[in-house]
Image (cartoon, helix red, strand yellow):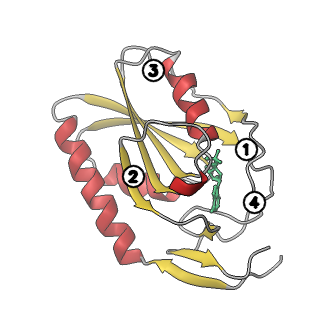
Amino acid sequence: MNHLDIKPYITQEQLQKKVSEIGATLTKKFKGQEVIAICVLKGSFMFYSDLIRSIGVDITCEFFGVSSYHGTTTSSGEVKVTLDLAQPVEGKHVILVEDIVDTGLTMNYLIQSIQSRKPASLTTVALLEKPEALKVPCKLDHVGFQISNEFVVGYGLDYQGFYRNLPFIGQVQNFQ
Ligand code: IMP
């Protein structure tokens, strides 16, 4: 494995505070209703598992696997489905949980794919957003942190499959 120089960027405390805030907002929004929370694999698994524990309504869990980077650090623009949803979402309230919106191509694809299945509502959540990198408009209802156009790892986010287990978000230094 190629070891990178990683500078702490968003601490565990900042992550947990933000997760609680988003969780509280979603709890209020869906009070008394059932929701399906979709985890976008692989990057959002850690954020997702923290977030659903901070949402106090009845939730079922679904997993949607997509890959757009194919092991590099720039989006290929082509989204490949690696695992489709196991259950229909028609008529249900859906919360879509993504790790990071970079060009927006993946989120755009996910929104279209879920909307075509006719949910009762679709709420999008992204832990991170890189507004400078956005290439296609995409509707984000809740964003944890807006960050500059740098490559970050940790808290589920990877570089060539590694660093997902860092408990904080780190910025990769001197990245080519
Ligand atoms: P987009 O389609 O360009 O918006 O890319 C979204 C996907 O690219 C995310 O779900 C991540 O898996 C990956 N990605 C984008 N930026 C980063 C980053 O800084 N670190 C790690 N993965 C990233």
Residue at mark 3: C-beta within 8 A of ligand 1: no
Marks 4/3: CA–CA distance: 32 Å
Q: Relative to residue 33, is residue 148 drawn left or right?
A: right
Q: Earlier in the sequence, mark 1 or mark 2?
A: 1
N-term mark: 4 or 2? 4
The residue identified by callout 1 is: 68
Residue at label 4? 73
Say which amino acid is labelled 2. Val
Instruction: Give the residue drawn at x 51%, y 15%.
Output: 117
CB of mark 1 within 8 Å of CB of mark 2?
no
Secondary structure at badge 4 equals loop
Task: Find residue 30 and report its horizontal and vertical position in percent.
Answer: 22, 34
Horizontal side, residue 166 vs residue 77: left or right: left
Which x, y percent locates residue 12? Answer: 41, 76
Residue 102 visible (yes or no): yes
* Residue topped by disc 3: 89
Residue 56 seen by the camera: no
Q: Reading the chain from its start, which is encountered first: label 4 or label 3? A: 4
Disc 4 and disc 2 in contact, CB within 8 angstroms: no
For label 1, the crowd category at 10 Å Cα-Cα, with few meaning under 14, some 14 to 19 and many 20 or more, is some
- Residue on which disc 2 sits: 143
- Kindly identify the amino acid type of the residue bearing the numbered disc 3: Val
Question: In the picture, residue 118 is in which quadrant?
Answer: top left
First reached walking from the N terminus: tag 3 or tag 2: 3
- Cα–Cα gap, marks 3 and 2: 23 Å
Crowd band around label 2 with a 10 angstrom C-alpha radius: few (<14), some (14–19), many (20+): some
In which quadrant of the rendered view does residue 95 lie? Answer: top left
- Element on which disc 2 rests: strand
User: For the residue with label 1, is its CB less than 8 Å from the closest atom of ligand 1?
Assistant: yes
Mark 4, mark 3: which one is toward the viewer? 4
